Image (cartoon, rainbow, N blue to C red):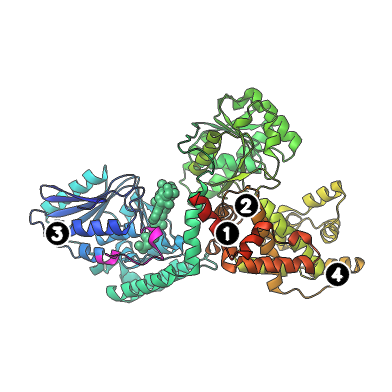
Amino acid sequence: MSEVVKLERHDVIAIVTVDSPPVNALSAAVRGGIFECMKTAIADPEVKAIVLTCGGRTFIAGADITEFGKPPKPPGLAEVLVLMENSPKPIVAAIHGTALGGGLEVALACHYRVAVKEARLGLPEVKLGLLPGAGGTQRLPRAVGPELAVKMIVGGDPISAAEALKNGLIEEIVEGPASGGEAFARKLVSEKRPLRRLRDDDSKLAAAKADISIFTNAVAAMTKKARGLEAPFAAADAVRAAIELPFDEGLKKEREGFLKLVSSDQSKAQRYAFFAEREASKIAGVPDGTKPRKVDRVAIIGAGTMGGGIAMSFANAGIPVTLIETTDEALKRGMGIMQKNWEATAARGGIPADAPAKRMALIDGKVGLENVKDADLVIEAVFETMAVKKEVFGKLDQFAKPGAVLASNTSYLNIDEIAKETKRPQDVLGMHFFSPANVMKLCEIVRADKTAPDALSTAVAISRKIAKVPAVVGVCDGFVGNRMLAQRGKQSEKLLFEGALPQQVDAVVTKFGMPMGPFAMSDLAGLDIGWRSRKDRGIKSEIADALCEAGRFGQKTGKGYYKYEGGSRSPLSDPDVEKVIDETLQKLGKKRRTVSDEEILERMMYPMINEGARILEEGIAARPSDIDVIWLYGYGWPIYRGGPMFWADSVGLKHIADRLSHYAKETNDPSLEPAPLLKRLAAEGKTFASLAEKSKAA
Ligand code: CAA
């Protein structure tokens, strides 16, 4: 008998239970165990029906991702599924938790499926740069029709048990998976229901066979945002094969697509990102077993753009919020914006029609800081200046209950200094959300000098609870993300003085896969803020200054580095900007030169990587993968490039160090000299990833 798969018999019903924590992934041992137990149950003359169920928190959550890229170990999943589908006795998959990827494919090879009402079912392989490789692209369209199948396979998001029931993916919603599965199996036996093999049932494909536009329209809708990605298109091709080819040929096509993707650079990067995200929740230097503090209520100070977005994130997760402002008017305005946002999402069908009212009911608007008194976590999201933050934290010390975690949503200020305003620096940390905070997934958790381990783990745990991706960072100007971004900003500005145009720089950056280039981003943020701050500090940036002097403050004034026509958000190149650049350079006695796209890319990316190396050296980030997580979830770094540090490894650190030295000389900018860590790794022929391996071994 297998260690991880058990077989029991309850008179005529055989129960096969997978129990392989944490998520019952289909490791070789699990595949082998299912195969042996199924073979035994099928051969047992007493057995009339078989239930496949799982112990622990979930049904099988997919292939074991750690096995990808390693030599395959028998039995293959396809072999297990053939045995199950060909079984002369009905097999029922009894699902709880998440039936994902290979897990749902196992269920699809069963003759019937039942699930508890909280279960979720999906084929998320595209999110790992893959397509379902064990018949999912062929059986799911036969179970639910090609439209929903495309949505699930090309989009990768799971559906609820209720939706699965409505669309014929499951037969019944049951109370408990094992007991419900067994009761259903008994019913099958007593009713002598025939076996239902999806392989042989083309009924739901008929409409798309007659009119392929049903399929192509569904694909067009799902690939709108798939720019640069290979997997969604390959997955769509495999589903098309289900419509156009006999089952076995479709399976062959699926297999070919899977094998191609599994060895692709994109999938390697996406699988890396999956584990990097999970690794980021493990806080370096915090003792094992450190328990997060209980958080039943959160207070958020400030109902502006950031505070409102943060409050929405908590209410979305069902956590009560006290939202605090200084005046009734500001509070009313903030609450009104939240309500409108939710109503717009509900109108688009993104959340149920009654959700806006339910979520608003979780938000208790109050005037006055004394109202933080019941909160277990307080997040300050007031104006970004040290003086204001210090004043708020001084008062929080008076009003917050003992043991409450006190967080500042600052994007660059020194948390140690803020913590000094309180008599409880152990409870103070940073929680840097990204705008719009109800949408962006990243939360940089800033660990100050005196932050207590359990305060830190509270911030990490609560971030995950509100569906954010936390990454712990240390105190420094701009933390990890903005500190690296500043290096890119510096170079993009310098490139204009050398001859590049904003649209050329942005085009290189977006072609690389970033959602926006630095100049379109500046236009969105507004050029006037930087202009005022430069004036205050007596600093000049002649091109940006000239644009601001001409009233070009960015999108909000319809003109900035680009022009925006008729209130549109799409940037259009503007010859007037080129004129401003030419005139400024003339005044400065500088000549424009042709800057190649290759140089632009290198000067956009390599200085950021250099800064990443400094950040690692200083211990501001514990792992290169934490830096990657920050860029993936806070700045829209293309997932198929893994993150800046992962990408740097793929480019080669020696090449990057050499190019940085070259630009340092060429542009007379010593800050571009390779950081000592980068230099050392380059000289030793090593990667950033080698640092993570070392720290794991330590
Ligand atoms: N393989 C290996 N390990 C996995 C895994 C998998 N498929 N899924 C999760 N894990 C590991 C995680 O790395 C994590 O490990 P650590 O505790 O050591 O960090 C642990 O299981 C728990 O995972 P989470 O922290 O993510 O737990 P959660 O409760 O928040 O989420 C989950 C659970 C929804 C299952 C989530 O882990 C998930 O989405 N997993 C991936 C599912 C997936 O993509 N499946 C498809 C795989 S590809 C495939 O199946 C190809 C095919 O066609 C055969």
Q: Which residue is mark 1?
A: 688
Q: CA distance from mark 4 to mark 1?
A: 41 Å
Left-right relation of 32 to 676: left
Left-right relation of 609 to 93: right
Q: CA distance from mark 2 to mark 1?
A: 10 Å
Q: Look at label 4 and name its amino acid.
A: Asp
Residue at 60% x, 67% y: name it: 652
- x and y percent of residue 342 in the render? 54, 45
Q: Secondary structure at mark 2?
A: helix
* Disc marking residue 582: 4
Q: Which residue is mark 2?
A: 616
Mark found first going from the N terminus, 4 or 1: 4
- Magenta: main secondary structure: loop
Q: Look at label 3 and name its amino acid.
A: Ile
- x and y percent of residue 199 in the render? 25, 68
Q: Which residue is mark 3?
A: 42
Q: Secondary structure at mark 3?
A: helix
- x and y percent of residue 279 in the render? 49, 50
Looking at this view, name the residue that lies furthest to the left.
Answer: 45
Mark found first going from the N terminus, 4 or 3: 3
The stretch in magenta equals 63-79
- How would you rate the neighbour count of disc 4 (Cα within 10 Å): few for under 14, some for 14-19, many for 20 or more? some
Circles 2 and 3 in contact, beta carbons < 8 Å: no
